Every structure is written in C-alpha cells, then in structure tokens.
Image (tube, rainbow, N blue to C red):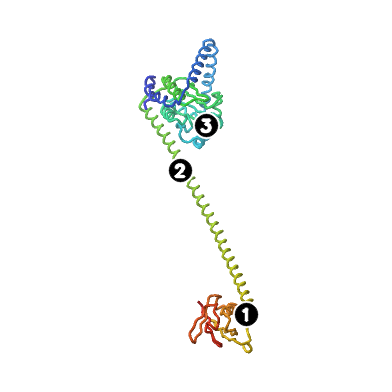
Amino acid sequence: MNIVSEKENYTHLTKPYDEKIDNIIIEESEEENEKQANKKTDKKEFANNNQVTNTKKKKSYFQIVRENLKSILTPFKNHGESRFLQEYEDTYGRTHPNFYNGTFKQAFNTAKEESKFLIIYLHSPEHISTTAFCEQVFCNENIIEFLNEFYVCYCDSIKRSSGFLLSGKFHVTTYPFLAIVTTNSSSQSQILKVFEGNFKAYQLLTGLINTLEQNSALIVPPQSAGEEDEIRSNREIREKQDREYRESVAKDEERMKIEKEKKRIEKEKRDLSLELERLEKERQLEIEKKKIEKKERQKRVMEDKRRNLKPEPNYKTEEGVIRLRVVFPDGEKLSRSFKKQWEMKNLFDLVDIQENNSIKPEKYYFVKNYPKTSFSVKNITFENAGIQDGDTLMVIKK
C-alpha cells in the first residue's frame, strides 16, 4: 500500500470504513444523544470561562506524555511478548488485531519504517471493563481490518514490568487504555489520541479514522523505491515470523492434544484391563461357589438316599425275596437282596451311594444279558420289570 501524506487521500482510503461505522452502532437513544450534547455544551461554556486553566491542564497532560516518550523508547527486556499473546488468546480467542511481537522500541521503529501511526493498548486483566472490551470491541472485524491496514498495534499487560512502566509513563487512571502516538522522526513524537474507560466499537473506529485523516501530514511516506522495498521486505519478514510463530503454536497445541488423547486411551486401556481382571476373578469365584454348592447338594442327596434306603431283607427266611448281582463298568461287583414288590428305585439308590468313580449318579442304566433287556425306569417293581432271583445286571453309562 502506498502511504500518502495528503488528508484527502487518507479520506479516500478510509471512506469505506465511514460506511461501516453505521453497521457497528446497535442503538443510540435520544436520551444518550441529549446527554452527550449537553456535555459538549457544558465543556464549551466551561472552556470559554476558563480558557487559561483548560489550556494549562491540556498542555500539562500531553506535555508529560511527550516528555516521557523518550524514556519509554528505551529498550525493554523481552519478558515474553509471545507469552502475553498466548495468555490473551487462551482467554479471549484469536480474533483480534495483529499484536506486534516485540518490544515497544521495536514496535515504534517498525511503525516509523512503515510510515504508520503506533497504537498502544495496555491490558488490565482484572479490570471490570476489560472482558467486555476484548470480547465486543477489540474483536470487531472492521476495527481489526482498519488497525491491521493503517496502524502498528503494540499491546502489553500491566501485570508485566514493561506494561506497568508504560502505564506509569502515560499516567493511566482507568482501563481499557489505548493511545495513538506519532512516529515521525522529523518532528517531536507526541500522543495524538487517547481512549480510556468504557467506549463502544463505533466510537473507537470513528476515533481511529478521524485521527488518521486529521494527522496524515505527520506521516512521512517512503522517499524512494529502495525504501519501499525495504519496508516491504521488513513487513514480509515480520509476517513470516508471525506466521511461523502461529504455526509453531498450532503444532504445539496439536502435539499436546495428541499426547493428551494418547494418555486418555492408555488410561482407558488400563482401566479396561483392571475391569476385565476384576470380572474374571468374580467369574472364577462364582464358578467355585457353584461347584461347592453343587457338591453340597449332591452330598445332601446321597445322605437322604442312605437314610431312606430300605434294610436288606433276609434271603433265607423271608418270602418274596430275590438276590441280584450288579457289575460296575470297572469290574467291581455288588450283591444284595431285595423284595420283588419293591420299586427299582431302591437298586438305583444303592448304586448311587457306592460312590464308584466309574459312574456318576443319574448317568447310567441297567442291562440284563438274557434275555437282553435294559432298565432305566425307577418307579417300577422288580417283578413287573421282569427281574428274577439270581439275575446279573450290568451298569452302563449313558
């Protein structure tokens, strides 16, 4: 962009922003207009009656600032401009004018080289009006566009030593605080405009435009193509540095995000592993519990069968008695007498209580070889089943 010193040329450049001011204003009540008009009338009347006093006060304030500008330009140590930018963006987001990444001295020289005014923003993070300013005014797209085009924006926090020193030099009494400073080496540097306290976006944009148009003669344009090339080169270098810084911050954020996600996944895996281990232990305990309960039930069943088994009748003296021989799968043999009117359940119970390892209770049946007959029903009598005295019954696994 070619910087010119004529006011009408700056008026041409800033004319589009004049139209945008109307879009920024939400509403301005008649009461507020009347209040502002009365204030101006009071100020004018006061100035007419006390011209000498007002002139002295105005001169005193700007004289103090002008006298301190030289000491302000003494280079500060870089206490982490990038840290302030990071803290600001963490709190208010990345929508803001381009903050100069360097010291006040460097910002002043850059504005001088680029033939721009320097605007200084002193940030007070704890002030009651700061949040509203950062979220409603400083993030306005028209203000951001205008500042990036026509100003070099230096920002500092009063929590840092450099920002605190600036607040003292400018005698700041309230926040937010912005000041527009000339950087023309051919004339004495001075403050042109101050914005303090609560103000709206359209008021700031109006002040920025008016200051630029009314003081355009103080800006010295480049005198030669070589100077323009140097300014362009410096601007490109600064933009490249800003871009590289933002890319570096983005990479760091992405790396931290990946590491955080990786740790979260590892934690979930550990938690899942511990949960699976816990569930497996519970399952094993449940299995063992069921085994014990099953054994206890079987033990009670066997005890009931022993207790309920009818006494063996006398084969020689009692009538209707048959004697049977039972052969187990492992070859073990068992002989016992039963009354033929008894049910075969007595034979099954007798085999169950033997605790023979070759069979399991309820998992077998009997077979007689001649004639070939199988027996698996318990509630039938020996006589009805066709079992006779002296028969041999084989125990067969199911």
Residue at 49% x, 48% y is 261
Place residue 382 in its image quadrant.
bottom right
> Which quadrant: the N terminus?
top left
Q: Which of 160 and 122 is in front in this view?
A: 122
Name the disc covering residue 310, or none: 1
Q: Give above or below for 39 relative to 245.
A: above
Q: Give above or below for 72 relative to 266.
A: above
CA distance separating discs 1 and 3 = 97 Å
Place residue 12 in its image quadrant.
top left
- Contact, CB < 8 Å: mark 1 with mark 3? no
| Amino acid type, mark 2 | Lys
Q: Give above or below for 291 relative to 107.
A: below
Q: Mark 2 points at which residue?
A: 251
Residue at 54% x, 10% y is 49
Q: Name the residue under label 3.
A: 131
CA distance separating discs 2 and 1 = 89 Å
